[in-house]
Amino acid sequence: FPSHDNRIEKNSGETDLSNSKDVPPQLLNISQLVNDALELMKFLFKKNNVHFQKNEFQTHLIEGFKNSLFQVFMNIFINAVHSMSNGGLVEVSLKKENENIRILIRDHGDGIDPHLIDHLFEPMFSTKGEKGTGLGLSICKEIIEIEHQGEIKIYNHSEKGAIVDILLPLRLERIEF
């Protein structure tokens, strides 16, 4: 049976996380996608005494690939929970900026060692020791920047915690080969 997964096996055994050229982007309600990820995280949030708060949270449609964006949000929310071992708050905002959507996800953990920030998106780099594979954020970067023509950055908040800053275009540029 043909797979409906967006992953394509390469001959070398590597997995290509980009979408097949045969699968067009969909028109997505990005706020609903973030809400769906938050809904799925409710149990983990509750178990770890983590609360979430939606700040400025506008509804907008973008072109994109639902499954891979959902994977990005889940990974970021899981990382936020892991950064707050004694519980805390995750804040999410979503707003339109020109022809883009900016999504800010802030945790109220300890923040990230400034010496490590430049390495967070490197494959196999993890701050979780044996518990992390070091693939989550590198995959998120590929999904946001290559697949969705956007930007993803992580930096420390001036008061406490870290911020994941995602900028996604409303419409994807079509590149013909």
Image (tube, rainbow, N blue to C red):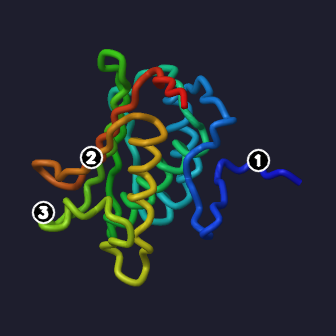
Rendered location of residue 36, percent (x, y): 58, 40
Judging depth in this view, the residue of 79 and 142 nearest the camera is: 142
Precedes in sequence: disc 1 or disc 2: 1
Precedes in sequence: disc 2 or disc 3: 3
Q: CA distance from mark 1 to mark 2?
A: 30 Å
Using residue 46 as the reference point, say whether residue 102 is left or right of it: left
Q: Residue at x 71, y 50 (%)?
A: 5
Read off the residue under disc 1. 4
Rendered location of residue 91, percent (x, y): 33, 43
Residue 114: assigned label:
3
Rendered location of residue 78, percent (x, y): 45, 59
Q: Which of label 1 and label 2 is nearer to you? A: 1
Which quarter of the rendered picture does the N terminus lie within?
A: bottom right
Instruction: Residue 111: tell me if it is visible.
Output: no
Q: Amino acid at mark 1?
A: His
Q: CA distance from mark 1 to mark 3?
A: 40 Å
Q: CA distance from mark 2 to mark 3?
A: 14 Å
Q: Quadrant of residue 53?
A: top left
Judging depth in this view, the residue of 17 and 155 nearest the camera is: 17
Q: Check the image and report above or below for 109 versus 38.
A: below
What SS does tag 1 mark? loop
Using residue 129 as the reference point, say whether residue 77 is left or right of it: right
Q: Amino acid at mark 2?
A: Lys
Q: Quadrant of residue 49?
A: bottom left
Precedes in sequence: disc 1 or disc 3: 1
Q: Check the image and report above or below for 72 versus 13.
A: above
Residue farthest toward the bottom in the current orientation of the protein: 130
Q: Residue at x 44, y 61 (%)?
A: 136
- Other residues around mark 1 within 10 Å, as few (<14) / some (14–19) / many (≥20): few
Instruction: Residue 54: tell me if it is visible.
Output: yes
Rendered location of residue 174, percent (x, y): 51, 24
| Count of numbered labels shown in the rendering | 3
